[in-house]
Image: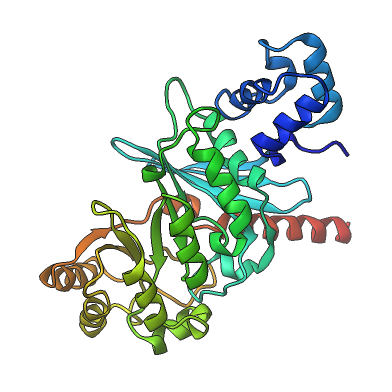
Amino acid sequence: MKPNIKELTLKEFAAHLVERKEPSYRAKQIWQWLFQKRAASFAEMTNLSASLRARLAEDFTISRLVTLRQTVSKDGTKKFLFGLSDGHSIESVLIPELKRLTLCVSTQAGCGFGCAFCATAVLGLKRNLRASEILDQILDASRSLAGDQRITHVVLMGMGEPLANYAETVKALDVMTDTSWGIGISPRRITLSTVGLVPQIQRLMEETKVNLAISLHAPTDELRGQLMPVNRKYSLQQLMDCCRALPIPRRRRITFEYVLLRGVNDSMDDAIALCQLLRGIRCKVNVIPFNPHPGSPYQRPQDAEVEKFQRVLHAHGLQINIRRPRGDDIQAACGQLQGEEVQHRQRQTSLAAAQ
């Protein structure tokens, strides 16, 4: 099997060219074709000689994801189920808003952290994604856009835990943010969401300039331990101490994500405890009414309950955003579309065996 060219770093590829008596500056030209012009073949790289294009085609492949399914919601949200080369699949969600177009990307096939309310957790962890597979979600989603549309923001909030796949995630971020030869998205427009892996959070903030979001979902250790097993390894105290010590630039904030589960974590006592937990941290809170999925025991709170929770946070001076569920009609919560596809394959297999 020929190697995938996108798995090399720019430095590694430049060294490859020099070994073959080609000027190293060609590396940037080729990277621009791959990540800025989204070239799917070496034949498209028309500012290279025909002989170089032929040699590249002999030495490398250019990866692409296979679009297994693509669905569009009545609110404009677009959901992709992408197939990987080994038969696994991942999901990405394209979310249009008034002045931005955000792509939610996956960093793992499945997830091993077992959050009780998450559709992806049901699937378990299949494997980490390679950097090229993270980047190809952006490139292939971009190919689906019309006219002058472009992805303006990226959130690493899809399937998997980005910081459990640290090296490949950061490698992908380097390409995403480079403006010379990479995709060229500002780090200020990229947000990475984590369940709270404390050592990796500290390292991420030292090594990158992306925004940080913490999946919190409970204001006490007891409740968070029930909802999120990771809390048994890194307690709320450890997580909050880490957040308070982070070198967050003056005009930026940590985002805390809080999925509201009816009758579980949405009481007024929960809201007050959350305010006390976050005291002294420059932050904002994304309150997310639960997006129901088949088989889940949890329910979405009523709008009035969400508003009561919001009022308590406002009264305590927290910056809060109510993130309304998007794409309910196309099962846009990560893991839902893949679960449906797995069930479809199982039904097809059963039907074939019965014939």
**Quarter of the image where the C terminus is located:** bottom right
Residue drawn at (43%, 58%) of the image? 205
- Of residue 80 and residue 160, the one placed in the foreground of this image is 160
**Quarter of the image where the N terminus is located:** top right
Q: Is residue 48 above or below residue 88?
A: above
Residue drawn at (62%, 55%) of the image? 167
Residue drawn at (23%, 65%) of the image? 303
- Of residue 94 and residue 340, the one placed in the foreground of this image is 94
- Of residue 343 and residue 120, the one placed in the foreground of this image is 120
- Of residue 35 and residue 15, the one placed in the foreground of this image is 15
Q: Is residue 85 above or below residue 107?
A: above
Q: Is residue 231 above or below residue 103?
A: below
Please state the horizontal and vertical placement of residue 58, each as a whole percent of the image: 86, 25
Q: In this image, 97 relative to 159: left or right?
A: left
Quarter of the figure with residue 138: top right
Please state the horizontal and vertical placement of residue 137, each as a whole percent of the image: 58, 41
